[in-house]
Amino acid sequence: MQLKNASILVVDDDTDVLTAVRLLLRPQVREIITEKNPENLPALLRQQAFDVILLDMNFKSALNTGNEGFYWLQKIKELKSEATVVMITAYGDIDLAIRSLKEGAFDFVVKPWHNEKLLVTLTDALRNKSKASSPSPAPKPAGAFGPELLGESEAMRDIFLKVKKVAPTDANILILGENGTGKELVAKAIHEHSLRAQKPFVKVDVGALTESLFESELFGHKKGAFTDAREDRAGRFEAANGGTIFLDEIGNISLHQQSKLLSVLQNRQVIRLGTNEPVGINVRLLCATNVPLAELANESHFRKDLIYRINTVELVLPPLRKRGNDILLLARHFAGVYADKYMKPIPELSKPAQEKLLQYSYPGNVRELQYAIERAVIMADGEVLDASDILFSPLEATPAVSATSEESNLEELEKITINRVLQKHDGNLTRTAKELGITRTALYRRIGKYGL
């Protein structure tokens, strides 16, 4: 069925939403009916048939169900309506909207939406209706979101669905998860599926910036602003103008830095060091941290007003140990990547190797698995990777192996391990961090801690 022949019912208690949808759809569809009170839904459905129902998730009603969207979705099913249901949700209710797909909705749209995106969603809903006589769940995402972000577990399917939904919006996203879970890959996927995809994607590891470099790096400086400022330089915010800026390790910046960042986000402008002239910026903000949100909300360490500013939507990436057979999916992917890189045949994983991979706890997450498979591909002699070929990072394994040791012994063992790998690579920090399965920033901290 084409959109121009469709009958659409919109149920939302926000008059502005109803007016906006009516103005958008009136020239596009055969019939558009709007309803503010969901209590009238049964009567409307008995009077006539609709092709698509746009249904809000929350109403100011006396039902007190916690979320009325589920209640009315169930009512629509009980009345045996053949309409395809698309839920309307706010940013903060995306988890609930995903649950609605499992309960029979076809899709959901996030307020405020882009008109073109809403029309595409309605067109897809009508195609779905032509294939089935009742609402059905949206097809689950494939096992990949781009060439590097892979996963078939339920946890990753939820992540892929959220990325698909939030990417076309301009919502600020906070990506949470342990080190090595793929936060940067998710940030890139959001940018690449956004309306800013053709504009710059600028990453800044803000956790590694000193107090003196923070403002210069992010906001820029004028020539002569400080000793080494030999020329005018635009900061990362200006470089990302029109596109996306990704602030990694946001949980590690000081309260003073947080104050400076908050001012820029509120005013939508930066002031280069050494000037008083504001420069307007138009960026989409993505942030990431391995600090749990509950810990981040401690105001002695992080400003709550900044959390609200950067956290319109949060995505929590699961640790690899909770992703089941995704471990083998990723292992085979990395085996193919590194076999190609080192000009070797793509190896198979023996049954003992698969069991070893599935039983390990992965404190270093996907990054640790990646480096373990790379080492295995390099060192293996045949076309099959056996359990003995797979060795995990000694640094990540240290806490588990020495769990009963004194803290001082743990630190001494960590220091010895770092020093040994540093010497092996002649002080090359990138190679050292790679072998240890940790980030360069984490390696910097440990080097400073142990005075290496």
Image (spheres, rainbow, N blue to C red):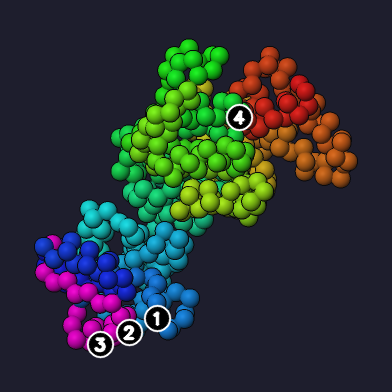
The residue that mark 2 highlights is 39
Spatial CA distance of label 1 from label 4 is 50 Å
The residue that mark 4 highlights is 211
Q: Earlier in the sequence, mark 2 or mark 4?
A: 2
Q: Residues within 10 Å of mark 1 (few under 14, many from 20)?
A: few
**Do residues under tags 2 and 1 come within 8 Å of each other at their CB atoms?**
yes
Spatial CA distance of label 4 from label 3 is 63 Å
On-image quarter of the C terminus: top right
The residue that mark 1 highlights is 61
- Left/right of residue 26 with respect to residue 144 in the rendered view: left
Q: Earlier in the sequence, mark 2 or mark 1?
A: 2
Q: Which residues are magenta?
A: 28-49
Disc 4, SS: helix
Can you say whether 443 is above or below 350 in the image? above
Q: Position of residue 134 (x, y in %)?
A: 28, 74
Foreground residue among 239 and 390? 239
Residue at image location 34% in from the left, 63% down from the top: 108
- Mark seen at residue 43: 3
Can you say whether 192 is above or below 50 in the image? above
